[in-house]
Image (cartoon, helix red, strand yellow):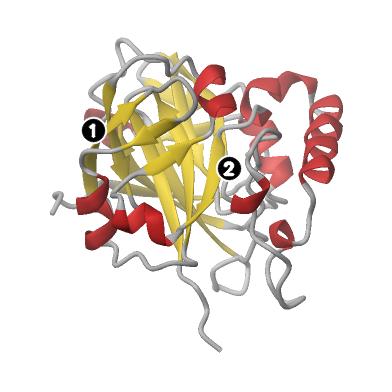
Amino acid sequence: MNAARPQFFKVLLPGFSDKLLIPCEFTKHLANLDHCRTATILSPMGKFWHVDLKCNGSNLYFTTGWKAFTQAHDFIVGLFLVFRYEGNMVFTIKVFDLNGCLKEYNYYPIRYPDQNTDNVPKKHDKKEDATENDTIEEVKQGMLSEISQHPSSKKSKQPSEFHKTIKPYNLNYRKMCVPRGFCAYHDLTAKQKITLKDSEGRSWVIEFCPGLKENYFRNGWEQFSKANNLKPGDRCNFQFVSKSEMFVKIIKLRKH
């Protein structure tokens, strides 16, 4: 298990949308600050946002990209934010509403247009989140609309994940197919090690193996599957962080 990850909180005050100050004492945890001036925030909506970091004297701020992030999440004065540092300049965030309760967001991740349709979840009960009822074309149009409305945040709106529904062969043959479009977009063309991380901070090293027809996660996939007790019908959302790291959100199959 990983050591406890550092956290800090902020109460949104007037002018919060322009920039957000990171507590000075917290910056000691940011080991890569000298080489990286961009942070990645995993939002409650299931998207990765890239936000620039800027120093002003001894103060460090979230700047470019932060305003678009606040607008997309309907931030208002008085909200209470809790940031947790996951390492490699990646943060997760929890948003507490004015009533003191955790603010709820629709989980609306972006799908890749070339994703195999047999891996796209079929329609279920209307109470399921919106992504299960949206077609790939609708998601593409939504992306284009968002980008046109916020030109300055194009980088944060680029597709950054793919979804897979666990099939029996993923468990029997101990491998998981990775969409070719996703690999091409992120320049994953050579055999390499990729670290998968979950929301609890656990990590597994998986071998990525490109092929002529398909690309796969292989060595290490069995350990990941067993550790998360994956069963046919469960969904895994793989979210790109870097060429050597991905965040995985697991949605267990509902039993009726």
Q: Nearer the viewer, residue 161 or 2?
A: 161
Task: Give the residue type at disc 2.
Answer: Lys
Q: Quadrant of the N terminus?
A: bottom left
Q: Position of residue 135 (x, y in %)?
A: 79, 50
Residue that extends furthest to the top in the rendered view of this protein: 35
Mark 2 crowdedness (10 Å alpha carbons): few <14, some 14-19, many ≥20 = many
Q: Position of residue 112 (x, y in %)?
A: 65, 36
Q: Quadrant of the C terminus?
A: bottom right
Residue 95: numbered disc: none
**Mark 2 sits on what residue?**
47
Q: Position of residue 192 (x, y in %)?
A: 27, 21
Residue 123 position by quadrant: bottom right
Contact check, label 1 and label 2, Cβ < 8 Å = no
Task: Give the residue type at disc 1.
Answer: His
Q: Relative to 145, is 183 on the left or the right?
A: left
Q: Relative to 248, is 62 on the left or the right?
A: right
Q: Is residue 217 visible?
A: yes
Element at label 1? helix
Q: Is residue 18 visible?
A: no
Residue that extends furthest to the bottom in the rendered view of this protein: 256
Q: What residue is rendered at 79% in x and 54% in y?
A: 134
Picture layout, residue 81 above or below residue 124: above
Q: Relative to 228, is 160 on the left or the right?
A: right
Mark 1 crowdedness (10 Å alpha carbons): few <14, some 14-19, many ≥20 = some
Picture layout, residue 95 above or below residue 31: below
Q: Nearer the viewer, residue 227 or 239?
A: 227
Element at label 2? loop
Q: Nearer the viewer, residue 143 or 177?
A: 177
**Mark 1 sits on what residue?**
29
Q: What residue is rendered at 14% in x and 50% in y?
A: 3
* Nearer-N-terminus badge (1/2): 1
